[in-house]
Every structure is written in C-alpha cells, then in structure tokens.
Image (spheres, rainbow, N blue to C red):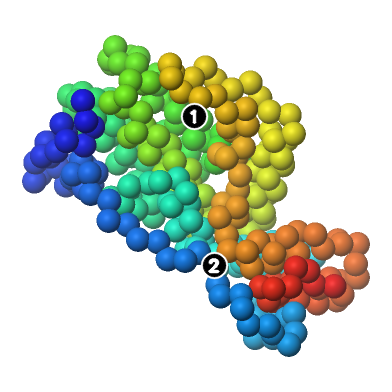
Amino acid sequence: MNYYNDLRGMLSETEQDLGLGFWRGILSGRDDSRHEDEDEDEDKKPASNIDYSRFKEAARIVAGLTEKSEVRSNLIQNLMREEVDWAIKRYLKIEQIPYPYHSLIRLEDCIEILLRGIFYKVVGLPRNSSLDSEIFRLCTSLRANKEKLIVYDRVSLLQNFLHEKLRQYTTIEVVENDFVKPIRCLLSVSRLHLNLVDLEMRDPAYNVYMHEVSSARASLEYLAPSLPPLAAEGKKIYKRWRVRHLRPISYFYRRVGRRRLSALLGLDIEMPFEDYVEAACSSFALLHNFSHAK
C-alpha cells in the first residue's frame, strides 16, 4: 500500500489540538521544499586571511573571560549558532526529509508529535493515555540528557522505545514497507531536533563536549566499524552505516564554518593566555579561502 495515498484525509479538524495536525501535511505527500546553494561564492580573493569585523566581534564575546577553556568554548558555541541555519538546510536535503517535517524541527514537542503520529495515525492504535505519558517522559528525558549521551545514543533509546511499544501493542514488523519511511523520518528529524535543543538550551562547555565525543565516536566507527544489523530482504548492507548518524551537526556547516571550527579546536592550550585569546579570535575570524590562522 502507498503510505501517503492510503492515509490521506484521515485527520479531523480537532486533531490540531491533539498535536497531530502536522500529519495533515505529511499524509498529503506534499514536498515543495527548495534548497539554496549551500556555500558562499568563493571567487573573490581577499587581501587578508582575517575578517577584522569578526575579530572585533570575537574580542567582544571573550571580554572578561579568564580561562582559555572558556574562551574556546564560548567562541565555538557562537560559531555553531552562526552556522546552524546552513546546517539545517543541508541536513534536510542530504537526509531527504519531506517538506512537511521542516516546520517541526524547532518545536519543543517535535518528537512527541512524531511519535504520536506513528502510533495513532500510521499504525492506527486507539488513543492511549498511558502510552502518551510514557512518550512524554521519554522525550523530557532525551531533552534533559542528564547522562550526557550524544545525540546518536539518545535516538537509539528512542528507536528502542518505538520497537518495544510496537511489539507490546501490535503484531507489526517495523521493516514492513508501510512503516519504513515514517520511522526513518522520525529518527532522522529527532537527531536534528536534539542537536538544536542542545545548542539552544545548554552551556558552551556542554556543546563542545558533545561535538568532541560525537566526532571521536564517528572516527572510531570509521576505522573499526561495528557489525551492521541484518538488512531486510533486498536491502544492501553498508559496512560503515553508523558513521553517518554519529557525525556531529558541524558536518553540515559551510566550508568556512568547518575551517573556523577546526582552527579553534586545534589551538595549543599551552600558549600564554593573551596569545591564546588572539589566536582564538583570529580563528573565529578566518576568511573562507584560507585554511588556518597562524
């Protein structure tokens, strides 16, 4: 059966109040997204490798800080927030997320809406207050992240919850064609949403930690890949399939953003404080066609 066509029109007008109105767009199969060119024009050759207005901005950001770790993490978080809109567009394009999902990613209850949609609209379960409470508790925990799990691990918890509840309430196999696409979109959008929650709600040191752990895990997975899960019949098995999902959100930044981030992360922490601050501000202010500040 066709997921979009067979479910079209199932929503009532009152379901907006239940957090399910979003599915009207999803079930219509509408995807009129447009993506802009993802990188800046790099034809012009600047006279210097530093944007001095950005250098002044960096100096303002770190004014009053007395620890090199604070200088580093505050500049990195500001850079992350600058790049986030580009990252969102690239992520949605590369992950091939249908347009109706795009309006959800910044909503506080993004994951709740998607989970309830899977259970009540895609699967067709009757409304269940106990299940609703479990969904709420899970999503609250994923956002709070007291255990400091990277996004990949939190989405794995979400996936396990989904599979467990489908086994509990239905006889559905999640690999069935009817459910593959909405579940894939749920997990992919949840990864992006949790990255945005971290960036918007947590402190600079937390976000640098998440970036570094995610990067390290992705690198390790690339060098020593885990055994892939068994694929459904007719599906290919990709040796390093986890790498794609372990990557930090910075993978989707513009080239200039990735260069600035790399320069900041690569600074020598043993430098004298004043030299470190100057190097950090210069890294933050790198222009796009220079790879490193000295």
At a point 15% along the width and 31% down the height, the residue shown is 6
Is residue 159 shown above or below 141? above
User: In the image, residue 215 lies at what x, y percent?
Assistant: 68, 45
At a point 28% along the width and 26% down the height, the residue shown is 178
* The N terminus: image quadrant: top left
Quadrant assignment, res 163: top left
Residue that badge 1 annotates: 157
User: In the image, residue 49 lies at what x, y percent?
Assistant: 74, 79
At a point 70% along the width and 48% down the height, the residue shown is 212
Helix, strand or loop for disc 2: loop
Whether residue 127 can be seen here: yes
Is residue 33 shown above or below 44? above
In the picture, the disc for residue 286 is none
User: In the image, residue 289 lies at what x, y percent?
Assistant: 69, 73
- Find out whether the residues at labels 1 and 2 contact each other: C-beta distance under 8 Å: no
Outermost residue, top side: 171
* The C terminus: image quadrant: bottom right
Q: Is residue 130 left or right of residue 74?
A: left
Whether residue 19 can be seen here: no
Identity, as a three-letter code, of the amino acid under mark 2: Asp
Residue that badge 2 annotates: 39
Which is more toward the observer, 147 or 281?
A: 281
At a point 45% along the width and 45% down the height, the residue shown is 95
Q: What's the CA distance linking mark 1 and mark 2?
A: 34 Å
Question: 10 Å neighbourhood of mark 2: few (<14), some, or many (≥20)?
Answer: few
Identity, as a three-letter code, of the amino acid under mark 1: Leu
Is residue 275 shown above or below 19? below
Q: Nearer the viewer, mark 1 or mark 2?
A: 2
User: In the image, residue 138 lies at what x, y percent?
Assistant: 42, 33
Mark 1 and mark 2 lie on one chain; the one further toward the N terminus is 2
